[in-house]
Image (cartoon, helix red, strand yellow):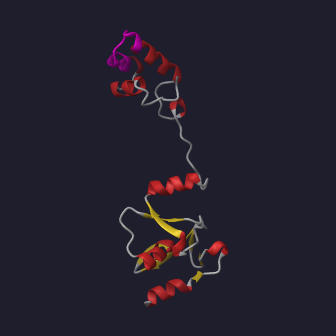
């Protein structure tokens, strides 16, 4: 064990609850431990993963099985993408989960649910083309196609 690794583990309480090894030094927003390792400022749990498992592949996150951001126990850590991290957070009902805004609740919506029904009705009757509907409602033809094929505004019957 080199000097840097020795210093790192001296900042850890290995007697935390549920087998967690708690980072005792600087915290970022009461969530994750922060440290400087090999001249880089980084999260302590990433250093712990590196010390036990080696290099973290590009684009990968180090996630917590235990949901304790201060934990640096390598057995409580696993690799995943940012998408995996968000899915894990949602599955465990952690943190702020942005509500999925759809339809007219979305701030950039140009049309309303009633418009969507009318667009589908007019197109199905053969009265208007996708381009005509796009002009009428002030959206692009591709958006009209997504509405007609229920790729967008799926929640509107």
Q: Residue at x 57, y 52 (%)?
A: 91
Q: Is residue 22 above or below residue 115?
A: below
Name above or below for residue 83 compared with residue 133: below
Question: Residue 102 placed where, x, y %?
Answer: 52, 34
Decide which of 44, 77 is in the foreground and name it: 77
- Give the image location of residue 121, x and y in percent: 45, 14
Residue drawn at 59 percent across, 66 percent down: 66
The verdict on residue 32 being magenta is no
Which image quarter holds the N terminus? bottom left
* Residue at figure coordinates x 57%, y 79% from the top left: 25
From the viewer's perspective, is residue 23 above or below residue 118?
Answer: below
Left or right of residue 43, residue 39 in this image: left
Segment colored magenta: 124-135
- In the image, taking residue 125 as reference, residue 68 lies left or right, namely right
On the question of residue 139 being in view, the answer is: no
In this rendered view, identify the residue nearer to me: 150 or 105.
150
Question: Picture quarter containing residue 60?
Answer: bottom left
């Amino acid at each position: 064990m080199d000097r840097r690794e020795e210093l790192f583990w001296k900042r850890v309480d290995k007697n935390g609850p549920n087998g967690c090894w708690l980072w005792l030094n600087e915290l970022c927003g009461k969530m994750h431990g922060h440290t400087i390792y090999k001249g880089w400022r980084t999260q302590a749990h990433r250093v712990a993963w590196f010390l036990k498992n080696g290099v973290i592949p590009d684009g990968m996150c180090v996630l917590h099985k235990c949901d304790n951001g201060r934990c640096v126990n390598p057995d409580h850590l696993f690799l995943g993408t940012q998408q995996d991290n968000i899915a894990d957070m949602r599955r465990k009902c952690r943190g702020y989960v942005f509500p999925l805004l759809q339809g007219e609740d979305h701030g950039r919506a140009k049309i309303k649910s009633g418009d969507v029904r009318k667009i589908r009705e007019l197109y199905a009757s053969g009265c208007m083309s996708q381009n005509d509907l796009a002009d009428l409602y002030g959206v692009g033809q591709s958006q009209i196609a997504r509405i007609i094929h229920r790729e967008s505004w799926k929640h509107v019957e």
